[in-house]
Amino acid sequence: MTRSTPDTPATESAPSPAEPLRLQVLTALALHRMATTGQLRQMLRPDGSRQLLSRTLNKLRTTGFTDLTPLPGADRPRTHAWYLTPQGARLTRDLPLLRGRPPYPITSTTAASLKTPHTLTVVRAHLPFAADARRLGHEHGPWDWTPEVSHPIGDGERVTADALLHYTITQGEHRRKLRAFIEVDRTTMSSERLAIKLIDYARLFTHEPPPAGRRRPAAPGPAWLRHYPLFPRILFILTGASPTRLAHRINDLKAMTIQHPLVAALAREVPLAAAILEDIEQLGPTHPVWTPLTTGEPQSWTAL
């Protein structure tokens, strides 16, 4: 398996079938925190059967490496979300792909149930990008979507993206590498709190690390240059409400972009956009479903 960190994705657009599915499942659950059987199939074996994933997951549960929690809702009594047990988390801790990642946060069925709705929605947002990459011959697989990427922004505070997306567009010999911070909004917070995330990213854009000591001056420039050649674009993915309410939330993001001086400065350098998750799933993220937070008509996220 190719070594990877949150800032250096794996180069494979999909896991190799030669790699044991058992190991791929453990790695996917360690990286993505939680997933349903159907989501794991779309990630790891999009052309395979659900039964294949189910057998593997049940064997891992029997050996104590995975467990499951039922999804909320009486209409889905047989659907569960899978996650790693503490034993499974210890087993994956030293995998090259996961070195440098924070400790696995789920240790019980109770903890899993509290994280299920948001975590599964973040996984759900990832899957259309992977499907688009397979369809278009681009590079983006399950290891190119890293949840919960955090960076300091000064004054002891941090900004944490729901995910960091790595995506490579390939057209013949031409390769274009794109990165994006992903913010998934399930309409569970106020519209103002959502828009304030733009201020946090604007602070990250200008934040410079303090000097490490008198004999070791800090590297010149903002801290994000330690991780990215270009500042990742910022994509908001919204769901969980009516189209009218989601449109209002997008308008609030646009208002913050225009009115706040730090965010306006960020927007002059970094593409910012928002889209509705159901539109991404139905049409694909490379369709013009993204509303720029500055001006302009909806467009593909790759054209921002």
Image (tube, rainbow, N blue to C red):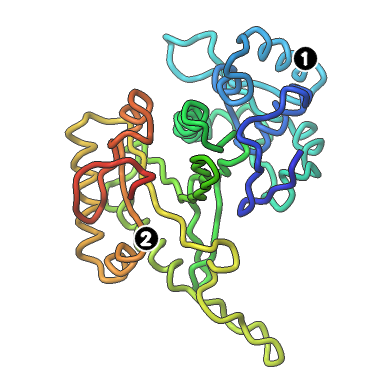
Q: Position of residue 209 (x, y in %)?
A: 56, 77
User: Which residue bears the numbered disc 1?
Assistant: 59
Taking 59 as reference, is 192 left or right? left
Q: Could you say which is closer to the camera, residue 169 or residue 64? A: 169
Whichever of callouts 2 and 1 sits on the residue coming sooner in the sequence is 1
Q: Residues within 10 Å of mark 1 (few under 14, many from 20)?
A: some
Disc 2 marks a residue whose amino acid type is Val
User: Which residue bears the numbered disc 2?
Assistant: 270
Q: Could you say which is closer to the camera, residue 118 or residue 304? A: 304
The quarter in which the N terminus is drawn is top right
Whether residue 111 is visible to the viewer of this picture, yes or no, is no
Q: Residue at x 53, y 70 (%)?
A: 156
Q: Nearer the viewer, mark 2 or mark 1?
A: 2
Q: Residue furthest bottom?
A: 214
Residue 153, compared with residue 53, is above or below; it is: below
Taking 194 as reference, is 44 left or right? right
